[in-house]
Image (spheres, rainbow, N blue to C red):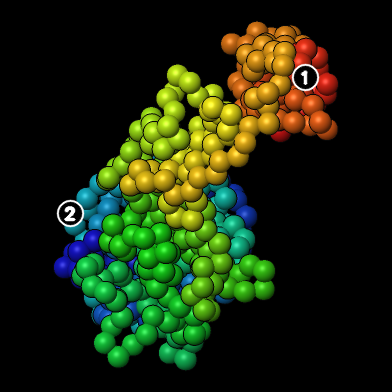
Amino acid sequence: MKKKFLCAAAAAVLVVSSMAFSVSGNDTRTAQTRPDFTIVIDGKETWFKSASGDSIYPILYNDTTYLPLRAIGEIMGKNVNWDETTKTVTLSGTRDSYSNTSKKGSADRQSVNIEVRDDFTIIIDGKEYTFKDANGNRAYPILWEGSTYLPLRAIGEIMGSTVGWDDNTKTVTLSSSSTVTDADTFNPSGTTDTTADGHISLDKAKQIAAADAGAAYADVTFLKGYKEYDDRRWEYEIDFTYNGYKYEYTINAETGAVVSKESEILRGSSVPATGSVTMDEAKQTALTDAGATEANAEFIKSERDYDDGRLEYKFEFYYNGYKYEYTVSASTGRIIDKEIERDRTVDAAGDVGVESAKSKAAADAGYAVGDVRFTKTERDYDDGRLVYEIEFYKDGYEYEYKISADNGTILDKEVDYDR
């Protein structure tokens, strides 16, 4: 979102929705309107009025500040829609009008009865959102006088903004991302990337996660970003996509250290998109290095894997009396690692062969070879004799067989339900 647009939206943020929501008698609780709270958006103090000219204030419930959902639509420049049948609020499209934002009104705190609505669904740009409080517990929308409210934490999450609170001045701040995205750092002059509690900010945590993945902050698409208390420490949970992968990071909110990270290839992705090599090309690299061809090599493994921030191909095959293991970079096509060892099975007589062993195992389970999904077919020595280790899946069960290479006898088998 561009800075110029946010300034326009900031002038109209936090206006109570005039849409009429039906009340279904959900869990009723007591809360407070808080006219003494100050809302600062991108450095500008803002006060709000409804379409009818009445002053509107934040609601404090369970020690959490809540703001009207329509305000989120105004901040994000999106229209707000309500579906009574499904109890769904949708934010989408481009908003072309904003509400009146006059000076602060005069009012006292007021105790009000609100409803906690666990049956409401929030969808923003086609994505369904659920929210958690600071302790990791599920946080639900609240309903008051026909308007839906969400906690500040939720607003910060869906906007990708940092939410701050100054208890001395009772001030809430919402800070948007910078309009400049190609800088080396994103610290405002004379400040640090920290919040009032001394933790790093959400934006800083995102920068750390993106940099660890080898990406520029502006090049990633953030899916999730929130702070929670876990294992006796505050952490940020950051999810984003980049270059065909989905990344999940946990960042220590106090130190900025990467606590954990996971990545997976997005379904349907052609990763990696730039400077990539296919699995067939990587396989040919390994074969050429070994002086073999696909016709005279016996492959027992060909897989794609992600290791230490990079996509790799892993191959294992037998050729000319040796077993070869290769790791090939998917981005450069270079051999990262290789191991060669003498194949102790080459001198064995009467080997039934891997295809016969596969057929034997599948038939014992009551299936044809083409009916099952093999996950392992490996030839090895076990207790001084040559065997085939065969593993496959069928109808929710995992089968593991050990077949004698001499005569095809089933030496061992295990069947487990794949939960």
Is residue 301 visible in the rendered image? The answer is no
Label 2 amino acid? Asp
Q: Amino acid at mark 1?
A: Ser
As drawn, 416 above or below 325:
above
Residue 214 image position (x, y, % from top left): 36, 60
Camera-nearest label, 1 or 2: 1
Relative to the observer, which residue lies in front, 164 or 298?
298
* Above or below 338: residue 115: below
Identify the residue shown where x is 49% and y is 41%.
Answer: 326
Crowd tier of the residue under label 1, counting other residues whose Cα lies within 10 Å: few below 14, some 14–19, many 20 or above = many
Residue 374 horizontal/vertical position (percent): 62, 22
Q: Earlier in the sequence, mark 1 or mark 2?
A: 2
Q: Which residue is mark 2?
A: 96
Q: Is residue 338 left or right of residue 293?
A: right
Q: How many callouts does the rendering have?
A: 2
Tell me if mark 2 has few (under 14), some (14-19) or many (20+) residues whose alpha carbon lies within 10 angstroms of its own.
Answer: few
Asked if residue 414 is positioned above or below residue 19 in the image, the reply reads: above
Q: Quadrant for the C terminus, please.
A: top right
Position of the N terminus, as image quadrant, is bottom left
Which residue is at a point 71% across and 21% down the rendered structure image? 348
Identify the residue at horizontal 48%, vertical 44% (top origin).
327
- Hey, which quadrant is residue 268 in on the image? top left
Say which of 178 and 302 sits in front: 302
Instruction: Name the element at disc 1.
Output: strand
Cα–Cα span, label 1 and label 2: 74 Å
Which residue is at 31% across, 63% downward? 217
Disc 1: which residue: 404
- Asked if residue 383 can be seen in this view, the reply is yes
Q: Secondary structure at mark 2?
A: loop
Please indicate whether residue 404 sits to the left or right of residue 149 in the image: right
Q: Quadrant of residue 328?
A: top left
Q: Whole-percent x and y of residue 75?
A: 29, 63
